[in-house]
Image (tube, grey):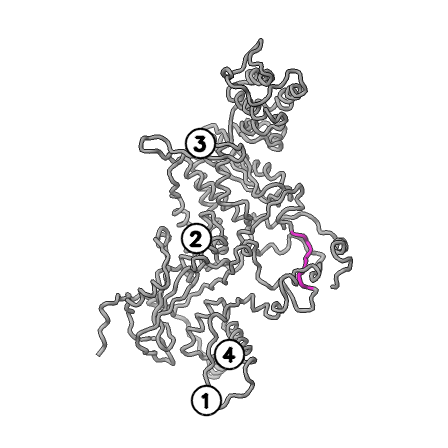
Amino acid sequence: MEERPNSSKLPIPRLPSDKPTTTARKRKVVKSPGTKLAEKRLRDRNRVYLGSAFQRWRDIRVLKGFRTDADLALFLMNSYQSQSEASTSTPLTGKRRRIPMPALSCVEESLSERLCRGENWDILDENTINSLENSIIDWTDDTWTPTKNTEEVSTSEEDETIEVDSYSDDSDEDYMPTIRIRSGASLAANINVEKLPEISLEDVVHGVVHEPAVQENDDTSIPEGIKVEDPEDIVNQKAAIVYHICLKQLTTFLELPITICTEKVAKKECGAAGPFEVDLIKRGTALIVKWMCPNGHIVWQWNSQPTFKFKMQAGDFMLATNILLSGNNYSKVALLFNYMNMGMVARTTFFSIQDAYCVETIEDFWEESRASVISGLQQDEVVALGDGRMDSPGFSAQYCTYTVMDNHTKKIIQVANTDKRETQGNSTIMEKAAFIQCVDRLRDEITLSEMCTDAHAQISALFKTGMYKDVGVEHTFDMWHGAGQQRECKILLQWKKDICNHFWFCCKMADNYDRFFAMWIGLLHHVTGEHEWSLDACRHDPLVDEPNKDWIKKGSKAHKALSEIILSERFLKNVPKYLKFRSTAHLESFHNHLLMYASKRFSFVHPVYKARVFLAALDYNHHIDRPLRRYPDGSVQGRKLFNKKSRCWSFYALKVEKDYAYIPSLQSKIVAARINSKAGLPKRTKLRHNDPRHLGLVCGVPAPSTKELRDKHMSRGDGQPEQQ
């Protein structure tokens, strides 16, 4: 009589079967007995019957990233052979003993590592391989150009950059010479560094070894878990950190819906009865719980995460998506998970998800959000504020982001990203090119009456004699840039702050040039201690305290120099552009958002950089109108904020916390892109039609001749050419 189940255990319900109830009728192909026998012999020639070890074989292959059964078999045979060579060569007699399977810790090397097994890495150290004495210049293809090998690229998101101070694009951080230095190539040993997997500088710092991605599959022999068939099935679902010991404790209180193993062995059920052994296996960020019978068969299986079609785990997908949406970087999150002893989505999987489902969805989402802002401005004359931001300082910049903000609503209405390759490798004209993209698009959508920028000479020329001279758009300058960045106002060091403040005050109070000039000329009297003169007087209150600086003697060299500066024709002709008293200071706040989503400490491929800029714009626009945080008595809560540029403290009014209410909608669109895809993750990533990488490498410097490089190398070495 069958035993009654233990009432103290919680029953696990049977999962619904996904097998179709009907099958399509196929046309039967009749084969002769001789043909069938020949085909069977051909199949049996390469077939190995694993019996009860089949499932364990399959688990090891999938878990460790072997692509085929032959790869796993080759590794196990090589491992056994290397162990056997160390033992006695005396043949075994008597009863045959079972050869134990190698421990899982032995099956750690990836396919790329096995490709390098022929290299003698163990007999050489890093310094020997990388030494200049053991390296050669390899220039085997004189027809090579920077545009080659750009059709299929990796989607590497972030490489740690080095900030440089240079006056030439030759020192660009992305400069890659069109010659190859082969490390270790002159050694007698068989050394080929290029066969090794690539590692980024950030990975070197963090010291994280990225495991190969688990291949997606549709193995129907395992009971199905929860499927993600709609964005609502995973977006906004709660998640938690679960420790293995706690989960294993829970399994002791659970009762399976089956009591015996139903695995087919030689057309018969295994029939092994419980208790079944519980095995916990890490797969990405998920945990797989397997109940194993004494014969090694999987009786039941449970996944801690829902899955998409093609078996992608929803938790891995959402983590990869949200790393990007939150402005984080993969390597830092991977390091955090490593500290927590948690599984992590594979690096290649992260980049594939980012490129296949996130980048274009984010751009489309931004365009929808931007369209709603533009529609609210189409009935008005718009005053716009614009400013550019480079992704790294100096001439090493690769990207320029030009942002345009509506002066009234303070919302971002246009963002343009320019790659250095789109300006023939000249980083100094990227801001002008991005500005033109912004203005041209805005003029097609709204009535643009005024454009306020900093005093950028190239942009100013567009309105004086260039393409925007007669388009009806007034060009004005940022007030703070005019007050604080006029080089002529910084010669007299003691008075430079007072001069800048006076310029700011005059622009604020004057509504025309004549009134500005009357107040501005009073500066020549004030610095001498004269505050009233025949035609006018200073606007400040009577001075009580002695000044903390010396008065300038009237007629002295310093006074004449100041007079030449503030009355110079070049300076005064730009004054009307400041009298609107506009400021692009709010764009500085947006640039802080850019630093969060696209830090200057990292470089990104062009599609990912654009997506991160759009995320910053979405964040800024959504939260710009947050209410202020107040105390119970109604007063505004504030903090002091230090400005490094002005080197002074300012008041910062606190706002209520951000809610990021738009993120679930964006997540749903990304999840929908995965659900609606007709295939799994692409194995290779192809460049989009508008990707600047089609234009070649960032560098535009022709390679010197091999002789020149050899002579230069000899001058730094011992004067002897390298043997090749």
Alpha-carbon span between mark 3 and mark 2? 44 Å
Q: CA distance from mark 4 to mark 3?
A: 77 Å
Residue located beneath label 2 in the image = 673
Secondary structure of residue under mark 3:
strand
Q: State which tag comes first along the sequence, 4 or 1.
A: 4
Residue 605 on the magenta span:
no
Mark 1 and mark 3: Cα distance apart in space: 87 Å
Q: Which tag, 3 or 2, sits closer to the chain's start? A: 3
In the rendered image, residue 723, in percent from the top left (x then y), is placed at 75, 63
Kindly identify which residue carries mark 1: 95
As displayed, is residue 598 above or below residue 639? below
The answer to which image quadrant residue 341 occupies is: bottom left
Tell me where residue 404 appears, x and y as whole percent. 51, 35
Instruction: Name the residue located 74 percent from the left edge and 56 percent from the top edge.
Output: 717
Q: Nearer the viewer, residue 313 or 231?
A: 313
Question: Which of labels 1 and 3 is toward the front?
Answer: 3
Of the image marks 2 and 4, the number of the one nearer the N terminus: 4
Residue at 58% across / 14% down in the picture? 530
Q: Which residues, given as a range, are shown in magenta?
A: 176-185
Q: Residues within 10 Å of mark 1 (few under 14, many from 20)?
A: few
> Which residue, given by chain and number where applicable, does mark 3 sit on?
651
